[in-house]
Amino acid sequence: MVVIVVVAAVMVYAWSTGLLGTLLVHPTTGQENLALEACTPCTFGSNGQNVTMNIRELGTVNVTLTSYFVKDSSGNQYSRISWNPANPYVIAPNQVKGIVVSINTNCGSSCSLTGNAFTFTSGYSYTITMVTSRNTQFSFSVTR
């Protein structure tokens, strides 16, 4: 009976300190890890309202892009919350895909603007944040 009590006490101690949770096997669900390929320069549209970025998935799962945000140096921002291109942007592990990000009138009614309207202007930097279906955010800086 003493042995049972001692084992139970050790189990309670291990559980309460979190040791038991680290000893258990946790299933892996894969990792998303997007990287911007060499973008010097990125391909900008002639009207300054879109940019094509080559994005590589360095993780272990397919990544589906669902929305993006483009912010200029003054804090003005275009948001495309419901990003549903005809062919969804799905990037497989270790693959590169050209992702087109549109702003201003090229984005149409699916973008919302916070602040003043802008276009991609030569010599300026922009922060583009992409959001995945797992709600992971990846931010990239591009300069025109």
Image (cartoon, rainbow, N blue to C red):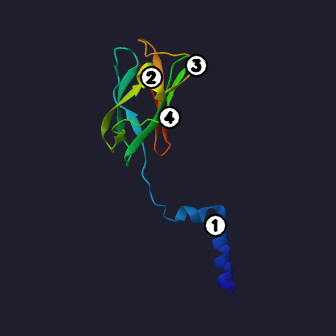
Q: Which mark is residue 15?
A: 1
Neighbour tally class for label 3: few under 14, some 14-19, many 20 plus, Cα within 10 Å: few
Residue 41 visible in this rendered orientation of the protein: no
Between discs 4 and 3, the one toward the N terminus: 4
The residue carrying mark 4 is 81
Between discs 1 and 3, the one toward the N terminus: 1
Q: Which mark is residue 115?
A: 3
Neighbour tally class for label 1: few under 14, some 14-19, many 20 plus, Cα within 10 Å: few
What residue is at 31 percent from the left and 36 percent from the top? 96
Three-letter amino acid code of the residue under disc 3: Gly
Three-letter amino acid code of the residue under disc 2: Ile
Spatial CA span between label 4 and label 2: 13 Å
Q: Kindly state the secondary structure of the residue where label 3 is placed.
A: loop
Callout 2 touching callout 3 (CB < 8 Å)? no
Callout 4 touching callout 3 (CB < 8 Å)? no
Spatial CA span between label 1 and label 4: 42 Å
The residue carrying mark 2 is 103
Image quadrant containing the C terminus: top left
Residue 25 visible in this rendered orientation of the protein: yes
Disc 1 versus disc 4: nearer the observer: 4
Q: Kindly state the secondary structure of the residue where label 1 is placed.
A: helix
What residue is at 42 percent from the left and 22 percent from the top? 142
Q: Is residue 51 left or right of residue 27?
A: left
Disc 1 versus disc 2: nearer the observer: 2
Spatial CA span between label 2 and label 3: 13 Å
Neighbour tally class for label 2: few under 14, some 14-19, many 20 plus, Cα within 10 Å: many
Name the spot of residue 67 as percent of width and height, x first.
Answer: 47, 35
Three-letter amino acid code of the residue under disc 4: Ile
